Image (cartoon, rainbow, N blue to C red):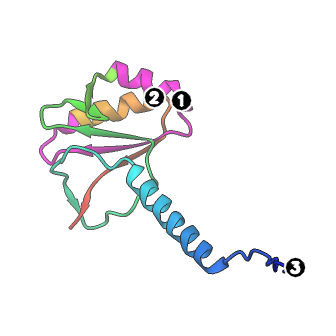
Amino acid sequence: MQYLEMRKGRVEIIPMIDIMLFLLIFFIMVTIHMIPTQGLPAQMPGSSTARDLPKPKVVLTLRQSGAVETDGHTISLPDLEARLRQGDPAETQVTIAADKGADIQALVKVMDACRHAGVSAIGLAAKPE
């Protein structure tokens, strides 16, 4: 009568670590590409004192024509005020990216609309010189 040897199964830890590391890197790369970086190019003015701003919740693009865009769609100033009031205006950060040739009066109107909605954190986008 022969006896069969019963071996205990071993869990190989090195290949499991390799797979887990691969999955971690994969999910990091996927998450990085999910961050929205879409936008329309604007000829922003340069500034020698430009610095990084906190990540804005709302990015507005002011065109030379005076049109205001957000998320790739043109928006009127009353609609902009209503949209900003939907969230918590005190916590909302707005960054305005104005074209180099945009009218100053149009910029002031956009800033006034943000202030009327209760937003106090307004930044102007500029490229470093």
Q: CA distance from mark 1 to mark 2?
A: 6 Å
Q: Nearer the viewer, residue 55 or 126?
A: 55
- For mark 3, what is the residue? 1
Three-letter residue code for mark 3: Met
Three-letter residue code for mark 2: Leu
The dot on residue 87 is 1
The residue at 37%/28% (across/down) is 113
- Looking at the image, do the residues carrying marks 3 and 1 touch, with CB atoms under 8 Å apart? no
The residue range painted magenta reads: 78-105
Q: Quadrant of residue 104?
A: top left
Q: Is residue 30 above or below residue 83?
A: below
Say few, some or many: other residues with alpha carbon within 10 Å of mark 2 (under 14 / 14 to 19 / 20 or more).
many
- For mark 2, what is the residue? 84
Secondary structure under badge 2?
helix
Q: CA distance from mark 2 to mark 3?
A: 84 Å
- Looking at the image, do the residues carrying marks 1 and 2 touch, with CB atoms under 8 Å apart? yes
Please state the horizontal and vertical placement of residue 102, each as a whole percent of the image.
16, 40
Q: Quadrant of the N terminus?
A: bottom right
Upstream in sequence: badge 2 or badge 3: 3
Say few, some or many: other residues with alpha carbon within 10 Å of mark 3 (under 14 / 14 to 19 / 20 or more).
few
Q: CA distance from mark 3 to mark 1?
A: 79 Å
Please state the horizontal and vertical placement of residue 79, each as a whole percent of the image.
36, 20
Secondary structure under badge 1?
loop
Q: Is residue 20 above or below residue 35?
A: below
Number of the front mark, 2 or 3:
3
Three-letter residue code for mark 1: Gly
Q: Is residue 84 above or below residue 128?
A: above
Secondary structure under badge 3?
loop
